[in-house]
Image: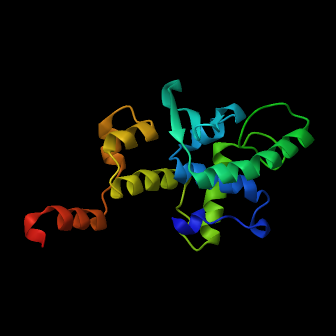
Amino acid sequence: MAAVLSRPSAGESAFPERDAVILELLYGSGLRNSELIGLQLESIDWAHQRLLVRGKGSRERYVPFSDAAAQALKTYVPHRSLRVGHSGLRHSALIVNARGRRLTSRSVGRIVKQLAVRRGLSPDVHPHTLRHAFGTHLLEEGADLRAIQEMLGHQRLSTTQRYTQLSIKHILRVYDESHPRAK
């Protein structure tokens, strides 16, 4: 996943600043594709470094974003404003295409796939792959399942349990650290 998250260079994308934000928010905050494209400029709470996200069933939640995402957003927003301004449109959609219009979920999928393929990864990488990696990596690093559920916006804990998969590496580490006969 780290290969996908390296910053897109200017030569490989029509809008690398936007692509960096897409990757940082899908993987770094675990957003659904639909939540990403639904973000507005006013969804960003800079003071608390979090996003107000509208998830399934119009449920709202706050989701933190990383320092890397904050930097990507700060770099991107002026470029976004220029593109929207040149288009003559007046809207506050955060994620826009090169012509200043709101990006579609299908376009986000294409962008993620192109970035993955350019970095030698499987063409099967999708926005949901990054969301899944977010949940799995949090779990592997010891995050509480309830906290992961909240960040992912799952209504039921059972969804989070199915969604996050324990890797064999994590299982072995827990065994080695916890079981009295492991040592």
Q: Is residue 99 in sight in this rendering?
A: yes
Q: Quadrant of the C terminus?
A: bottom left
Whole-percent x and y of residue 2? 53, 66
Residue depicted at 69% across the width and 64% down the height? 8
Q: Nearer the viewer, residue 110 or 63?
A: 63
**How many badges with numbers are in the image?**
0
Which scheme is used to colour this image of the protein?
rainbow
Choose top left, top right, bottom left or bottom right for residue 50. Answer: top right
Q: Is residue 109 in sight in this rendering?
A: no
Above or below residue 34? Residue 23 is below
Image side of residue 126 versus residue 108, left or right: left
| Farthest top residue in view | 58
Above or below residue 90? Residue 141 is below
Residue depicted at 40% across the width and 53% down the height? 138
Q: Nearer the viewer, residue 97 or 147?
A: 147
Residue depicted at 75% across the width and 67% down the height? 12
Whole-percent x and y of residue 129? 49, 55
Whole-percent x and y of residue 142? 32, 54
Above or below residue 42? Residue 79 is below
Above or below residue 24? Residue 158 is above
| Farthest front residue in view | 47
Whole-percent x and y of residue 177? 20, 65
Image side of residue 177 versus residue 60, left or right: left
Q: Nearer the viewer, residue 9 or 44?
A: 44
